[in-house]
Image: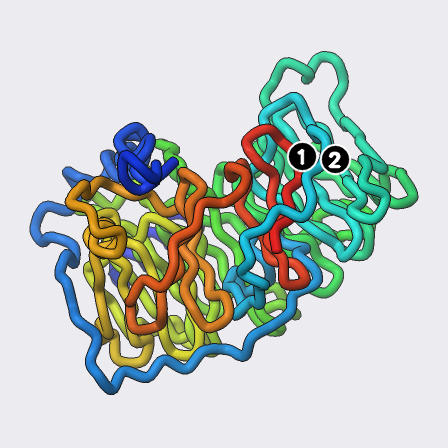
């Protein structure tokens, strides 16, 4: 109790077509209603200022230096890597279907898939772990950890893979590790509290947080707790999960109260923390929402509602704070940050100065590109950098290719509808479609 009181005192002090012919506008209104629900809890909390909502034309001398292009071969983490940030992937861009599997599950599938170089790994709502071999073109392993008394509970599994081992944390309180090649359960523990975060691995530790915002260091070899760090609890829950990212020296943990912690990998002690919850009522019932945190070089980037924060990862000091939201996880490359606002703007921000380099209305630019006056709302599922261009994957399974100066280059309809988030593997796009079939595109 003393810890929580002290912590709160410190915080207070710190205080499918585009038009009727092509179909890109299809289901836009239906999706818009669902997405607006994410922000409705916050509308009454931030009334003093309005979020960024301006069109900014790029200057003629704008230079965007990106990471080098990468042929990616594995995808072991739901957010790709420890930093939760994407690379500049390569892709053939032929938009051709080269493979479609049989249905992998009859149940609701996890929205993320992983790939270890040979196998696609995913889970479903019944708790099944599914391993599909792209070489054998078949499911080589399927396992369900749960006994009969737990069968009826919908399973929400967070998972990560390393060296043929899948580590799973669930919404019941179980944590377990399975070697999916040897087909053997290595260990399983019941921590009796639902887990509510993504998973990370650093050295010999598995990192995870539960619904009460208790952060754990777990021995990845036997499942035993090495250390736990209590942080602020929240009474009310929303769609935001605790977010973890790490580099070689530091772990960054953003909890559902809105506090960002930096924890040393070696001694497992807190180095600094800062509260980013901008609610007018700073208490344990305050709602906080953010996208997953990302790391880019010396920056930790938090895109919350309603502010964007860019912090120095060594000190926790805020370098940039902007009143701008993002409806999806942003992407950072070089010194540029790209995000999509709830007002459907694609925004490019300089991470050093906080300057908006350009801001375009996706709906209007798409309408202009197609030469139609039928402007409706497009909903973006994911943003990636591919072959030095921005790729916007829409929820209705279209892809908009945009140059680094904010100009639409190409619009394609995917040969099969998106069911999961797509991943980039060996110049191809890989995902499960809405029928739970594995799709590979060149």
The residue singled out by tag 2 in the image is 130
Residue 29 position (above or below residue 62): above
Where does the image place residue 415, in percent across and percent down from the top left?
53, 42
The residue singled out by tag 1 in the image is 123
Which badge, 2 or 1, comes first in the chain's sequence? 1
Where does the image place residue 252, in percent across and percent down from the top left?
50, 62
Q: Quadrant of the C terminus?
A: bottom right
Q: Secondary structure at mark 2?
A: strand
Q: Are marks 2 and 1 in contact (CB under 8 Å)?
A: yes
Residue found at the very far bottom of the displayed protein: 61
Q: Quadrant of the N terminus?
A: top left
Asked whether residue 221 appears in the rendered view, the answer is: yes
- Residue at left 80%, top 30%? 143
What is the quadrant of residue 153 in the picture?
Answer: top right
Q: Residues within 10 Å of mark 1 (few under 14, many from 20)?
A: many
- Residue at left 33%, top 33%? 26
Residue 349 position (above or below residue 303): below
Residue 435 position (above or below residue 440): above
Q: Secondary structure at mark 1?
A: strand
Q: Residues within 10 Å of mark 2 (few under 14, many from 20)?
A: many
Estimate the spatial distance between the alpha carbons at disc 2 and disc 1, rounded to whole Å: 6 Å
What is the quadrant of residue 163 in the picture?
Answer: bottom right
Q: Nearer the viewer, residue 411 or 14?
A: 411
Q: Nearer the viewer, residue 425 or 6?
A: 425
Q: Is residue 254 left or right of residue 215?
A: left
């Amino acid at each position: 109790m003393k810890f929580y009181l002290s912590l709160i005192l410190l915080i207070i002090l710190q205080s499918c077509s585009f038009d009727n012919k092509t179909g890109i506008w299809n289901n836009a209104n239906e999706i818009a209603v669902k997405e607006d629900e994410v922000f409705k809890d916050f509308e009454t909390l931030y009334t003093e200022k309005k979020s960024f909502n301006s069109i900014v034309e790029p200057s003629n001398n704008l230079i965007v230096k990106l990471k080098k292009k990468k042929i990616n071969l594995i995808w072991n983490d739901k957010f790709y890597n420890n930093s939760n940030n994407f690379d500049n992937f390569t892709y053939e861009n032929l938009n051709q279907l080269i493979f479609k599997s049989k249905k992998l599950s009859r149940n609701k599938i996890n929205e993320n898939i992983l790939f270890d170089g040979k196998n696609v790994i995913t889970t479903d709502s019944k708790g099944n772990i599914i391993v599909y071999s792209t070489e054998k073109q078949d499911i080589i392993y399927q396992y369900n950890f749960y006994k009969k008394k737990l069968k009826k509970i919908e399973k929400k599994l967070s998972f990560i893979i390393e060296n043929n081992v899948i580590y799973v944390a669930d919404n019941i309180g179980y944590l377990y590790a399975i070697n999916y090649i040897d087909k053997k359960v290595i260990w399983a523990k019941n921590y009796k509290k639902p887990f509510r975060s993504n998973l990370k691995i650093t050295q010999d530790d598995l990192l995870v947080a539960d619904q009460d915002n208790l952060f754990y260091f777990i021995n990845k070899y036997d499942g035993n707790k090495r250390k736990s760090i209590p942080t602020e609890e929240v009474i009310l829950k929303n769609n935001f999960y605790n977010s973890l990212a790490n580099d070689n020296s530091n772990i960054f943990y953003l909890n559902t109260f809105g506090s960002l912690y930096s924890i040393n990998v070696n001694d497992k002690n807190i180095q600094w923390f800062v509260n980013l919850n901008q609610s007018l009522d700073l208490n344990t019932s305050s709602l906080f929402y953010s996208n997953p945190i990302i790391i880019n070089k010396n920056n930790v980037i938090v895109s919350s509602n309603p502010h964007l924060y860019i912090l120095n990862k060594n000190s926790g000091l805020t370098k940039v704070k902007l009143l701008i939201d993002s409806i999806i996880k942003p992407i950072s490359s070089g010194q540029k940050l790209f995000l999509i606002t709830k007002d459907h703007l694609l925004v490019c921000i300089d991470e050093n100065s906080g300057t908006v380099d350009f801001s375009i209305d996706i709906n209007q630019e798409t309408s202009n590109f197609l030469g139609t006056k039928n402007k409706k709302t497009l909903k973006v599922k994911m943003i990636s950098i591919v072959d030095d261009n921005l790729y916007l994957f829409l929820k209705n399974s279209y892809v908009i290719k945009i140059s680094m100066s904010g100009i639409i280059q190409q619009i394609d309809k995917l040969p099969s509808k998106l069911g999961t988030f797509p991943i980039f593997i060996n110049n191809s796009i890989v995902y499960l479609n809405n029928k739970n079939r594995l799709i590979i595109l060149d």
